[in-house]
Image (cartoon, rainbow, N blue to C red):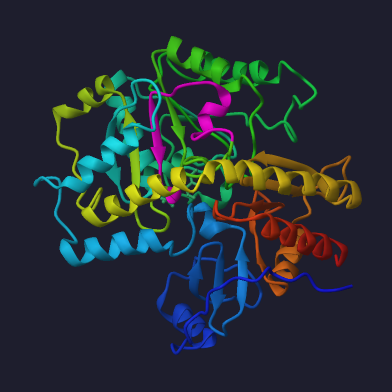
């Protein structure tokens, strides 16, 4: 059988002249956090990127179907983003919010214009964890309540506060955390109590949030926080109506609703600009990061003027949050998504991949579930479709084989049993077909 080939792409990577991958690995082992993990038995080193592709130090090209962990929205080193960032870097790299700067104000206006309802006030931070920290603070100060409901299988970050929201043993250290946080059951139509065949599943899962409020808290809560689609947890898409019912329960208990759009935002789901819109709700606070800056350390919290007002009794300051360079880059990202119709492309190419994955499911019994929206897709591998025993090693092996064939994939789920697909939103049909061919081969080789 012919090895799948990447479609031609006009970009000549520059010759790499830096230290070898072995040397970098050695340095990393000696000088870096020993807890960070590497994908692949023989780690690859990426030294260049252009749009949906990355190159290793030997000039080999790969399709980046994980998008730098769902961070590259408009394409690696998109020329316009690079030009704008370079220009700003040459003009003024840093000021802070103690002075006026046009970029932060103009970016806030552009971002607010993308938000529904009264979501008009922006705060800027450097990471998704910081954004979620701030959202929690906001909710607690605004409501005067303390308890927070999050979901099992959630990932909201690794800071002290967000580690408490995150609900995977993998990311939790054995230190005191999660004060006031209660985790409701995951509304997971594949592994949960109610499946896709149950039209009332959304309402039933939402009842657990109500139950938790009634039995686990004072009855008055600060917030409910959830990813609009769980990313790290393995692309779990909640049943229709879930957020609508949850939001009703939360608001009746005095709480605000926080949508974590760190992965699902900026058009990635294809049908909508924001992931929460796929559930027909408007949150009170939205957090975003990753795709917002296409690779720079940039994140945001957007809320209503009323909630923001509550936080003005003290100063909330963030040195780098919304600096002139990241705001310039962020504004370019918003413009490119619209001009290059990347949300539409996410829907078109995402559907092509989704259809292909469903066909692969008919052929490979190891695929237990196919799910996702737009270019946020996943397949869950199981040893047996009846028992749904996670096929963790097989999932790792598929990633290895795909890498050998020039395709970089992601992994998710508590047991690392779900393959994730979240390429830059500029991928094309030929990339989709390549991805499916490689995946088919990698599954066959198991
Ligand atoms: C949904 C979600 N929220 C928050 C975060 C934390 O973002 P950061 O790593 O930028 O702190 C992540 C990171 O993967 C995430 O996926």
Point out residue 200 in the picture as x, y percentages from the top left corner. Answer: 71, 15
Residue pictured at 76% horizontal, 27% vertical: 196
Does 327 sit left or right of 250 as displayed?
Answer: left
Point out residue 187 in the picture as x, y percentages from the top left corner. Answer: 65, 29
Is 274 in the magenta?
yes
Residue pictured at 21% horizontal, 48% vertical: 103
Nearer to the camera, 103 or 220: 103
Q: Quadrant of residue 145?
A: top left
What residue occupies the far left of the structure in this picture? 99
Where 124 sits versus 150, above or below?
below
The C terminus: image quadrant:
bottom right
Does 188 sit left or right of 88 as displayed?
Answer: right
Q: Is residue 395 visible?
A: yes
Residue pictured at 32% horizontal, 64% vertical: 83
Where 114 sits versus 338, above or below?
above
Point out residue 143 in the picture as x, y percentages from the top left corner. Answer: 31, 19
Point out residue 241 in the picture as x, y percentages from the top left corner. Answer: 61, 19
Does 61 sit left or right of 290 as displayed?
Answer: right
Q: Is residue 157 visible?
A: no
The N terminus: image quadrant:
bottom right
Nearer to the camera, 198 or 404: 404
Q: Which residues are magenta?
A: 271-291
């Amino acid at each position: 059988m012919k090895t799948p080939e990447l479609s031609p792409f006009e970009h000549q990577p520059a010759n790499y002249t830096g230290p070898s991958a072995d040397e970098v690995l050695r340095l990393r082992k000696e000088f870096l956090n020993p807890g960070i993990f590497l994908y692949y038995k023989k780690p690859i080193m990426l030294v260049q990127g252009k749009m949906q592709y990355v190159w290793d130090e030997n000039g080999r090209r790969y399709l980046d179907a994980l998008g730098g962990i769902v961070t590259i929205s408009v394409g690696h080193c998109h020329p316009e983003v690079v030009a704008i960032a370079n220009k700003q870097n040459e003009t003024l790299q840093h000021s802070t919010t103690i002075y006026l700067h046009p970029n932060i104000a103009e970016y806030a206006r552009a971002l607010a214009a993308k938000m529904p309802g009264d979501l008009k006030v922006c705060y800027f931070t450097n990471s998704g964890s910081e954004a979620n920290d701030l959202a929690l603070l906001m909710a607690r100060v605004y409501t005067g309540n303390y308890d927070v409901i999050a979901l099992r299988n959630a990932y909201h970050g690794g800071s002290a506060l967000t580690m408490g929201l995150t609900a995977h043993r993998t990311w939790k250290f054995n230190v005191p955390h999660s004060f006031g946080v209660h985790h409701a059951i995951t509304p997971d139509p594949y592994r949960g109590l109610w499946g896709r065949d149950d039209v009332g599943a959304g309402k039933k899962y939402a009842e657990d949030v109500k139950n938790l409020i009634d039995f686990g808290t004072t009855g008055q809560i600060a917030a409910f926080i959830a990813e609009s689609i769980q990313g790290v947890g393995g692309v779990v898409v909640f049943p229709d109506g879930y957020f609508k019912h949850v939001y009703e329960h939360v608001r009746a208990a005095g709480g605000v609703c926080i949508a974590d759009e760190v992965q699902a935002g900026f058009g990635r789901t294809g049908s909508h600009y924001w992931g929460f819109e796929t559930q027909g709700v408007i949150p009170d606070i939205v957090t975003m990061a990753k795709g917002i800056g296409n690779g720079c350390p940039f994140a945001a919290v957007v809320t209503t003027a009323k909630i923001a007002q509550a936080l003005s009794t003290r100063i909330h300051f963030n040195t780098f949050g919304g600096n002139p360079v990241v705001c310039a880059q962020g504004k370019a990202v918003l413009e490119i998504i619209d001009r290059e119709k990347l949300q539409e492309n996410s829907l078109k190419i995402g559907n092509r991949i989704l259809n292909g994955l469903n066909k692969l499911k008919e052929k490979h019994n190891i695929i237990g579930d196919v799910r996702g929206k737009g270019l946020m897709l996943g397949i869950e591998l199981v040893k047996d479709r009846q028992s749904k025993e996670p096929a963790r090693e097989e999932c790792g092996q598929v990633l290895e084989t795909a890498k050998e064939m020039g395709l970089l994939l992601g992994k998710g789920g508590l047991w690392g049993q779900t393959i994730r697909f979240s390429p830059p939103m500029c991928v094309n049909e030929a990339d989709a077909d390549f991805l499916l061919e490689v995946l088919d081969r990698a599954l066959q080789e198991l």
